[in-house]
Amino acid sequence: MKTIVIDPGHGGTDSGATSQGYFEKNFNLSIASKVRDFLFENYEVKIVMTRGNDTTVSLQARSDLANAQNADFFLSIHNNAGGGTGFESFIFNGTVSTITHTYQDVIHNQIINAIASKYNVTNRGKKRANFHVLRETRMPALLLEVLFVDNNRDLSLLRNNTFINDVSIAIGQGVARALNLSVKTSPDGLFKVIAGSFTERKNAEDRVEYLSQRKISSFIVPTTISGVQYYRVQAGAFASRENAELQVEALKAAGITDAYIISDTVSPPTPPPPTPEERFTIQGVSLLNAFQLDHFVKTVNPNAPLLGEHYIKYGAIYGVRGDVAYAQAMHETDYFRFTGLVDKNQNNFAGIGATGPGNPGATFKTPEEGVHAHIQHLFAYSSKQNIPPGYEKVDPRFDLVTRGSATTWTQLNGKWAVPGTTYGQSIISLFKRNATYTIGQIEKQVEDLQNLLKEIE
Ligand SMILES: [Zn+2]
């Protein structure tokens, strides 16, 4: 994150220029504070102030602070005197980096664009001078002379909160643009308090003025909503909604009843719609029959046990797709060759409780009980209902399952198999192979039957 040192000129015993009882130091601080708030509330940036109140700080202390901070940019804010009018900016008149020139160009232009025609402010130009804070700081440094305190028209602008608001935002926007600051977001979003939103800029300016009289800092943020230009008056931005709500209360107490909170919460990207595979449910009716399951597995492992009947039976009892559960068993047991952790004699066809070497998981008395436990375990994941009456709890891990936490096969990813990001997909893929193989068998059977019928007609 970039660090910017903001330096409100003068302060404490050093008033800077004075005129008609007004002190330059106070104008400097009010602009600098608004620039700080604007940047802090809207951009990812670290801001360090050389002074945050009316205290005396030496020039050496200012440049030392910036150098110690290893800041990316030093911005000094002053107002002018001596019988002129208008805005000017300065960089060091010795050797400076190209980037210093760029920063001056971008920030100076941003400010002039915001105030020159609107307030009829003279552009006195981009200048260079041998000022301490420009010379002694080791990073790009810029000094602004906003207006002349000893010029009546300039002074009336400095006493106008709308002008202070506009010039401060323009400075902040110029800095953000010059340094390419990233717009602020936080995981919880940023809660901005809007103290009124207006289609007329004048009304927004009146609101800022009203708040200013009540010591509430705010600024105008132009926003386009559905093609309509609005001027929002932003009175603070908070990382927590609670604090934003406190500010809304404070605004209510100050007579602003239409304040509201907008959240910059970064909404998570909309997940893509689930694929047909991801919608494929665990619960459902088996479409393959027992013979078709056993027949398919024997094309891969001729010695596979005949379990199709149990899968279809218990699948029907629990409302689970027994034919797909069978594919899961083929996947878990390597087509009942048991080449993994689980031994053939455990009758554990779904790796229930098998976590790693030395822990091969549960053992069941018979193949039928093993299949029952498998289907029951799927039932635990895919349903919140009780085990059907008349059936015992044979799955030793039934109560460890968060009931209903996986209703589709792909939702078993990371649950039945860890990490297993493609576990459900592998099961479905095997089921598809079984189904495709079976369709081929049926088609052949239909053809054979048709041929036979022709023969005996
Ligand atoms: Zn000054």
Image (cartoon, rainbow, N blue to C red):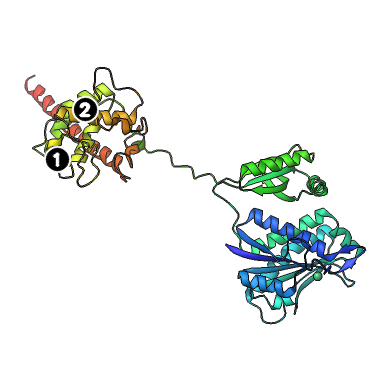
Residue at 75% in and 41% down:
251
In the image, is the residue at mark 2 within 8 Å of ligand 1 by its beta carbon?
no
Q: Residue furthest top?
A: 390
Relative to 82, 225 lies left or right: left
Amino acid type at image mark 1: Asp
Quadrant of image for the N terminus: bottom right
Q: Quadrant of ligand 1?
A: bottom right
Q: Position of residue 285 (x, y in %)?
A: 27, 25
In the image, is the residue at mark 1 within 8 Å of ligand 1 by its beta carbon?
no
Relative to 425, 364 lies left or right: left
Q: Position of residue 18 (x, y in %)?
A: 88, 67
Please say whether residue 226 is visible from this viewpoint.
Answer: no
Crowding at dot 2, Cα within 10 Å, few <14 / some 14-19 / many 20+, comes out as many
Callouts 1 and 2 close, C-beta under 8 Å: no
Camera-nearest residue between 442 and 56: 56
Residue identifier under label 1: 343
Residue at 25% in and 31% down:
396
Residue at 68% in and 66% down:
106
Above or below for 30 versus 70: above
Residue identifier under label 2: 372
Q: Position of residue 218 (x, y in %)?
A: 74, 50
- Asked where in the image residue 98 lies, by quadrant, the reply is bottom right
Residue 183 badge: none
Residue at 14% in and 40% down:
343
